[in-house]
Image (spheres, coloured by chain):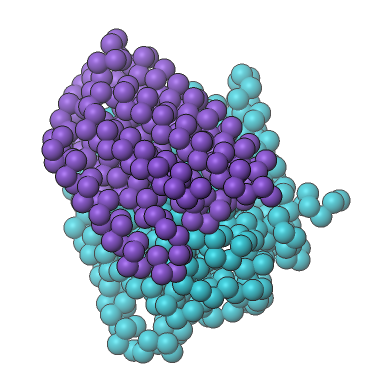
Chain colours: A cyan, B purple
Amino acid sequence: MNQHIIYLLPIFFSLFGALLCILPFRYMDRTLSVIASVLTLSSAIYLLFQPSYINGYFYIDGLSKLLILTIAMVYISTVLYSLPYIKHLGNLLFQHRLYYFLLNVFVATMFFSVIMDNLGLIWVGIEATTVSSALLIATQNNQVTVESAWRYVIIVSTGLVISLIAITFIYGSAGTLSLHKLLLTHPDNRVFLIGILLGIVGFGTKAGIFPMHTWLPDVHGKAPAPVSAIFSGVLLPVALYAMARLIQIYPVGTVRLFTFILGTLTVITASLMMTVQTNYKRMFAYSSMENMGMILIGFSLGGYGLLGAVIIIVSHGLAKSGVFFLTGDVLSRYHTTEMRDVNSLMQRLPRAASSLFIGSMAVTGAPPFAIFVGELFIFSALIAQYGWLMALVIILFLAIAFIAVNFKTGKMIFSENEKIKREKPHLESWIAIVNLILSFLVILFIPYFELLLKNLL
Amino acid sequence: MNQVFEILGFLLIVLTLIMQWEINVQRIIFLFAASSFIIALFLVLLGLSRPQEEYMLFILAGLTIAVRGITIPVVMNKALHRLYEKPWRVREDKPMLGVGGSILLSLVLIAIGYFIYQNSLYSILKVRSGSVPFALFLQASLLIITHKHAYIQMIGFLVMENAVVMLSGWVFGGLPFIVEAGVILDLLGLVVVSSLIIRVRERTILQEGISSEAELRG
């Protein structure tokens, strides 16, 4: 088979699924989305064992391959979870087939963003994720979801204009936008530096990085559970991928320090915001922001910090999507996202409750989950570069986040109410459990991750 | 040629200033269409000054007219017609700034754009009047921040994109064609999706008023 085609299979399958979804046959959208996601995951796994592919159009190295795999895994679980979930949602803005169409296109645009060699086209891909995902937020048609979809469009697009200016600067100073050429030449001038810094701020908007993160809690808090899951699990890391590439092509002290400061401020802001949340979906949204901050810190440190960041990307993608699926379960029973109105979860839904507790431990970096291991890698690099004091400051805020999330989740789960009776669990909660198990199993593959990323470490 | 660019840049700033104090949404859409035609003219002139890239820049100018100058305003206008009985009367009810305040703030922003450019970027870029696209960018941001009507916010974003086209052409000689074409396609998709969202949003607000829950916290 032509080598080109193998690398394009994930995009091909998701786009193919999208196009056929709009055909007006009953259950066609669902069936085809499942088939497309299974084929996508199979091709993503196959790609993992193929050599890197860099040819002027595509730039697919270990980092791209791991992101493709993460997207594919979250994609299949989102499609499977959506099958029963969307069916039960009332007051939909559009037909089911449009939901699956948009979901598949959204995934295709994410694949596009992580395989292109051209920074300008990476920008086009990331902006296309905004176009394809905005309506998904408003799947359930009410004033709040529509308002958050609008906020998402306007804030994220404005932020991305900053990164477009950045790309103009980079092209103007280096004469190329090709990643592999930029990596070979490492241009070094002030215009290029300004371009890189602006790019980090611009793409940071999409990744929920401080101070342009304000859209994130609103969207994650109001979107349907499967949409929150895919946003948190893979959309944010795709934007971080662009930032990682910018750091990679200009790995000087100023860029690294700037990124490190942004990452640290993101962790601090998210941790503090988590303590005052009363809405469980918003709390988990801030938890995603905190994890993105840690990943950015890892990218800024490079070496084993970068390995740690990638471990968090894969593990967080699976665990957080699982957690958001479970919040969908909770929402469908309690009909509220306010934590004070959700109690005795363990009595009512023991399987979902115990999974949610394990999930919240996993996403806050409790041992032995892979996020904990990723954070250990990041701290080892952090201590080597910035010393113990800086590491302790970040550990303090991670501890605040850990206590806030687990205390609040624990309160929802373990509070007791004699009147509450056990209910039959939803079958789809198994999807969340599978994701949580996979998130844990990431630990076993760390040596392979290291091998895949060896040219970046 | 630089002087012609300066005149076009000045015209774009004036158009954005008028958008700033105009409250009629339909007129703001027309003003945006006019500014897109100026951008297309700018690209044509840029093409004439760069014979080696002239065809690409001419195609880009054609795309700009087709998408930014015609299709986007038509899509937005149609959306207005679907939503309101009298679309020509749709206006920003409570602009955050009065005419005087908006002119003053716009002028301050132009001065800030000029000051920042002259004191930081000019020594690196060495392009005379390169502050114009930056001033335009700041004006567009002001348009978004000071208006609550979603259509006007959308126009603010589109003016920002126009400022980037001008910046890339004027200061750096433009982006590769495939990237520019991708940006235009994205823009078109974004406007279509935004029009749908805005239509649903405005319809709900017209029917129910703004609920306190819809005031998102960020």
> In screen coordinates, is A282 left or right of B121?
left
Can residue B97 be seen in the rendering of this structure? yes
Between A332 and A15, the residue placed more toward the observer is A15
List x then y, in percent, for residue B134. 36, 53
Q: Residue at left 59%, top 47%? A: B49
Furthest-right residue in view? A1
Between A32 and B201, the residue placed more toward the observer is B201
Between A137 and B139, the residue placed more toward the observer is B139
Which of the 4 quarters of the picture holds residue A23? top right
Can residue A126 be seen in the rendering of this structure? no
Instruction: State how many labels appear.
Output: 0
Between B88 and A205, the residue placed more toward the observer is B88
Q: Residue at left 31%, top 23%? A: B27
> In screen coordinates, is B53 left or right of A279?
right
Q: Residue at left 69%, top 57%? A: A58
List x then y, in percent, for residue A196. 47, 66
Q: Residue at left 68%, top 36%? A: A16
List x then y, in percent, for residue A83. 52, 34
> In screen coordinates, is B150 left or right of A44?
left
Which of the 4 quarters of the picture holds residue B209? top left
List x then y, in percent, for residue B115. 28, 61
Which of the 4 quarters of the picture holds residue B48? top right
Q: Is residue B181 above or below residue B130?
A: above
User: Looking at the figure, which quarter contains the C terminus of chain A?
Assistant: bottom right
Furthest-top residue in view? B85
